Structure formats: C-alpha cells, structure tokens
Image: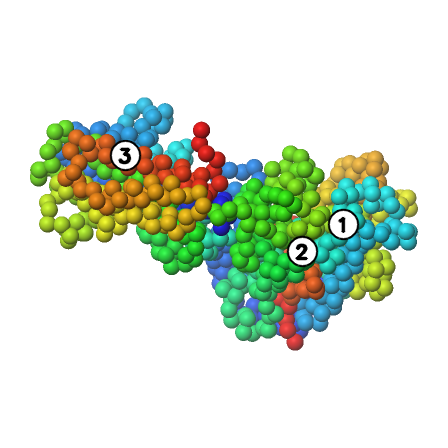
Amino acid sequence: MDRTRPAYDEMYAEDARVRPHYAAYSDWLVRQPDDALRQKRAEADSLFHRVGITFAVYGEQEGNERLIPFDIVPRILSASEWRTLAAGLEQRVRALNAFIADIYHGQDILRAGLLAPEQIFCNPQYRPEMQDMDVPGGIYAHIAGIDVVRAGHGEFYVLEDNLRVPSGVSYMLEDRKMMMRLFPELFSLNRVAPVEHYPDRLFENLSSVAPAGVADPVVVVLTPGANNSAYFEHAFLAQQMGVELVEGQDLFVREGFVYMRTTRGPQRVDVIYRRIDDDFLDPLVFRPDSVLGVPGLMSAYREGRVTVANAMGTGIADDKSIYPYVPEMIRFYLGEAPLLANVPTRVLRRPDDLAYTLAHLDELVVKEVHGSGGYGMLVGPTASEAEREDFRLRILASPEKYIAQPTLALSTCPTFVEQGVAPRHIDLRPFVLSGREVNIVPGGLTRVALRAGSLVVNSSQGGGTKDTWVLED
Amino acid sequence: MLSRTADHVYWLGRYAERAENLARTLDVQYRLSLLPQQLHADGIGWRGMLNTLGLAAAYADRHDALEPHRVIDFIAFDRDNPSSILNCLRTARENARAVRGTISSEMWETFNATWLEARANAPSRFTARNVAEFVDWVKYRAHLARGVVLGSMLRDEGYHFMQIGTFLERADGVVRLLQTRLACEPAGTDGGPVAHDYYPWSVLLRALSAFEIFRRVSRDSVTPGNVLGFAVFRRDVPRSVYRSAALVYENLQAVANAQSAETERRAGLLHASLRFGTIESIPPAGIDAYLNGILATTADLSERIGRDFLGHSPAG
C-alpha cells in the first residue's frame, strides 16, 4: 500500500510481461489498428443510444438521458483469482446477513462488546420498525453489491458493502452483450464464463424468499419511476425476469395484503424487489411526504404477508461507520478467518485514530460515514490546502461522522482512450444473491476512471464501465 | 396487466398514430397548395386544416399572420406546440419508455430511434421547406413501427389496448382529414362529377394510401361523395373509418371486464352504424354533422376506456 510504487496492472506484470490469463487477448489486441478500435467504440455508442441504455440526469429537460461511457477493453480475471474472490464474497455476505438478523433480534454482538450500543441505536440507518420481526429464511440483504479493489501486489480489498439498493447489474449484462456483438471472435479465443443467466438466478432467489405457504409467488419490481437515474435497470430487470414493473401508485394494501391495480381488478403481490430507499417505502411509517411508496406496506410486511427485498433496515450493515467491524463479524458469527481484507480504516471516534488522521491529512482519504457516490469525501493527496483545511474543521466539529483510509493505488487496466490504449484505475462490483442459497454470477461490473490518474470511478463523476471476464479453467 | 401499463400502451398507440395522421393531413394540404388554381384558396386551406385539427387558437397565439411555412413549422416541428408531429413522436417514445419492460425490445428501440432521429434532424435536415421529405420519413417510420408491433408483440391485453388506441386515433384522424378537405369545398356542391374535384380528392386518397385501392375496387369517378363514401364506409380499406371502428370494437371485446359493458355497447353501436350506413343516406348538408357525431363518439369512448380499464378517475 505504498503509493510511491506504481499501481498493480491487471494485464502487465512488473517486468512488462503479459500476465498468462491476458495472453490470448493481448495477442489479439496488438493486431488491432487504432482506427478499427475507434470505429468499434463509435458503433457501441450508437447502439447504446438506440437501445436506450442510459441513465437519467436530474434537472435537465430534453435529452436528459446520458450514456455511461463503455470501454471496449475487457477486464479479465483468472479462474483462480475468481475462486478466491467468490469464496470471500460469499463468506462476507453470510456474515453481514447474520449481523443484521442479530441486530434486529438478540443483539449478541453488542453484548459481546464488539460494537458500542450507540453505534447502532444512534445510527439513522437502524430501523426500530424492524426490531424482533422475522423475515423469510433470515435473509435481509438478498442482493448485495460488494465493491472490491486491488492494490499492492494485486491483493483484493473490500472498499464498500452495498446492501440497500445496489445498482449496476444491468450494465454488467449489457456490456457483455455489447462485447459479444462487437468482437465475437474474442469469445472463441477465450473461455469466458457466462453471466447472462443472472436474471433467472435473481428471479429464483426472489421466489425462494416468498412468504411461507405461497406456492407460485407473484414477484414485482418496484421503481420510483421513469425519471429515476437507474430506471433503465429497473425496467430491464423486470423485463428479463418476466415480471411487472410497478410504481408505488400501482400498489395498495387492503386487509393486510398487498395488491396491484390491473385491468382485471386487484391482483395479490407476494415479493417486492424494491428499488426505492427505505425512507420512501411507506409514508405511514417513514417519510410522510413520500408519493413513491405504498401506504400500509410496512404493516403487511411485518405481518409476513409480503416479502420486501432487500429488507428494510439493511443500511445498518453497510454504513461506513460499521464497515471497519465486518472482519470481526465474520469471526464472531461464522467462527472463520476473513478471506477478504478490509481497507485498513481509522475510525475517527477513536482519539488516537483522530490524532493520526489530522496529522496525515495529505496522505489519507477521509469519508463521511453517511456519504455515497464519491461525495462527502476528501482525497488528501490531490486536494488543495484550502480543501484540507475545510475538512479539518469539519472533522473536529464531529469526528464520529468520519473514517479515514490510506490512498489506495487502485489497480489499473488497459483502457481505450483518446490517445490509444493506456492504463486507467478500476474497481469491481460483483453481485451476491442470497436466498435459500448464495449465488454469485462470475464477474460483476468493472468501473473505470477514464481520466488519467483519477481514482474516482463513479458514473456521476466521469467513470465508465468495462465488460468483466472470468476465464474458465 | 397493470392499469398504468395498459394506459401507457394505449397512449403509445394513439400518439404514434396521431403523428402519422398529422403527417398525412399536412401532406394533403401541402400538395394542394402547390396547385395554381388553389392559390387564391390557399389561406382557406391552411386555416381549414388548423380548424379541424383544433389548433387554430394555439397557432394564433404564436403567429400573427397565416403563412404556409409557419403553419407547416407549427404542425410539424414546433416544440412548444404539444400536438406537433415532433412532440407526438416524443410523447409516443416517452410512453414506450415507461413500459419498456413490457413491450418488446424491438418495439422500444424502434420508437426510441424514431424520436432520436427526428430530434437530431429537425430543424437541420427536416424543415418546412422540404416538408414532403419529412412526411415520407414519418410514414416510413410508422410503417416500420407497425411491422415491429405485428412481428414482435405478445398478443395479450397490452396488444389489444395498443390497437384500441391506434384505431380510435385513426378514426378520429381520418374524420378530421375529411373535414379539412370538406372545409375547402365551395358551398352548394351537389356531389356530381366536376373536373376540378379530381385533383384535391385524389390527393386525399393518396394521403390515405388508398388511391390505387379506390381505382381497383370502385368504378366510380373521383368525386367528393364517392371518396367520402369510400373513406368512411368501406370495411376493406385499411384506413377507413368503418374499419377503424370495427377494430376498436373487436379489441375492446377481447379485454372486456366487469364494468366495461356499456363502453362495449357504445363501441358496438358506432360499429353497427358504420357497418350499415351509406353515404347516400346522408344529405350533403348533413355530412359535417355526421362526421362531428363520429368525433363525439370517439371522444366518449376514450374517456370511458380510461375509466373502465386504465385507472382514470371519472371526469367532472
């Protein structure tokens, strides 16, 4: 984690030799003229526009939909790298689900003293409405998006657990479709593990957590509507699963059950894959001004008449203030050593971590514990003196709101940019499905920071995506 | 099917059809305005079109003078006119986007591409000056969309609601197109063959893609009465009012629910009146009233369908 050393490159070893799992691709790549690649990239852009694979941008009128830039150079993981990663992800998500179940039941972890009670009960992500309620299979985070980066000599680190409404899986699927269309020959040169069955797995997973006694559950996807930035993904997943895409106004609760309004009258709904935040789900319980949700949903949910995925209150486990304790959770709930490392994290509510951080602001990344999407964050080495000073004051005002981490030299992957193929920093978001069993489709969404040297991969801040290949043995 | 989904497919059908009908109406008026003998009547023609489309007031708000290129621009491209062809294509696309998970991907891509291309080309390639090219393009995209719907859409309720929207709109649009033409007829025409009738009414037939059909199925000459009878009452002409009403009725029967009996009855009544009606049974002076009656029925059916199926609250 020494940032003077160049970042780990996914394709090239330190002696500039191509890593074995990239060999077939690299042989192919060097034979492609830049013009041909440029033309393929233009073709991809026009296809994405026509197919409408876009994200909506708030506050703009006509043409308020943008493309997330797609890079035509894939990110490749070897079979053994993936095995390590997948085992670690499954372990981590099992522990996180166990943690949420424990928090909303016996709270053994608090009694064991691993976490202070105020870290839970003073956290806005803790939902008292969920206390002592049983959910099917004891699963809370049915769909988890775990952000993983590589640093140092290529070790994996978990950067963030996304357990509320993680998005991006549609790009994983569409990027693959695009690569197969643009470069079919690559898929005969490489044995790439398929990802296309994700919607089937998702549907099975959602069906498996239906309320007890429902034989053929009616599953729906609940979206905030066509103006939401991830609307394409909501519509895409509903279509791929063959289920209805509903808005809050399409659902209502009567005599304890949830129904949707159809042209033939009300129809029962058993499982809601919701892509709306907790706060907006039920105006009777959460934000009363929400028009996106369904009045009475929470009471039907508490009665076990409908399953909501992900469960309400999962935010307590993916909060940045809880993140530093996940390795402890793995030991505590599973009795296992963590297979995937956390990024070493300083918790500024601890006085010595605070003192260290203030003395090393120019080296560290400081994050607000409730921020997301790359906002509310100080990247010390690239920030100006004034920005660091501003953050110092904010930290001193309420240190418990911040954590600090070393600036990771995220791994780089060759990327096709204006100047040709050049290394750019990347991360990875695999999607972990938990139901009756845990399922991970090989790969995930690779995000890439398209600006040279940038470490910010978020699509809201100039990031793009790549197809992610897991090679089969 | 979700009521909201049915609502969106219904309006998808309506707006796609409306864009095409507007293009066809514009086409007729534009071609007629090129005729030398029509020069003096030109103002009447453009004004008559705005009137029958219900857009005269909206136009007057935007422009002082009635100038052909401004009228064309207003009907075809004006982004502030919610009923312009461009906006109909946009609204059709917005409705498709709202149900992109329900309709086929090919359908969504077609409606999306139509809108993206229209937006990219107006006002550079498509302008009032070459409106004929634009009209051809709109018709071409409409043919394409129809084919995609026929070839890729599941024949479930969504398909029926889209058909209902399409054919209600078509009945409405064709009636308005006929009224536009009638508004330019000199008063006191008795319906007999007059040489100067030929061109305007054959243009109208062409706008309905029905000139060759008329020639083939009818020995009659091109007169206002013959063309009206043909465009309103023939079952086998794809854009006739009768055929549109028949398809509304047929598709409505396929989706009937517990509360839709009265709506079905009224659609059936319209269907029967066109099935057994003849142009000869309507006195020439009563034609406009007859056509207005059809417009009132289509408006009533639209409102009732909204209430019975699509989750709209009752008007008033």
Residue A437, relative to residue A42: is it above or below? below
Mark 1 and mark 3, same subunit?
A: no
Q: Nearer the viewer, residue B236 or A1?
A: B236
Direction top: furthest residue: B64
Please, what is the three-letter code of the amino acid marked with disc 3? Gly
Residue A348, relative to residue B33: is it above or below? below
Q: Nearer the viewer, residue B44 or A10?
A: B44
Q: Position of residue A353 (x, y in %)?
A: 88, 47
CB atoms at circles 1 and 3 under 8 Å apart? no
In the rendered structure, find residue B293 and report the number of the disc placed on it: 3
| Count of numbered marks | 3
Q: Position of residue B69 (x, y in %)?
A: 29, 33
- At numbered mark 3, what does the secondary structure look like: helix, strand or loop? helix
Direction bottom: furthest residue: A473
Q: Give the CA distance from mark 1 to mark 3.
A: 61 Å
Q: Position of residue A357 (x, y in %)?
A: 85, 45
In the rendered structure, find residue A133 and report the number of the disc placed on it: 1
- Determine if residue A446 is in view: no
- At numbered mark 1, what does the secondary structure look like: helix, strand or loop? loop
CB atoms at circles 2 and 3 under 8 Å apart? no
Residue B305, relative to residue B46: is it above or below? below
Give the labeled residue for mark 2: A211
- At numbered mark 2, what does the secondary structure look like: helix, strand or loop? loop
Mark 2 and mark 1, same subunit?
A: yes
Q: Position of residue A93 (x, y in %)?
A: 75, 59
> Looking at the image, which residue is at 59% across and 68% down?
A194
- Using a 10 Å C-alpha cutoff, classify the residue at mark 2 as few (fewer than 14 neighbours), some (14 to 19) or many (20 or more): many
In the rendered image, which quarter contains the C terminus of chain A? bottom right
> Along the horizontal axis of the image, is A401 left or right of A204?
right
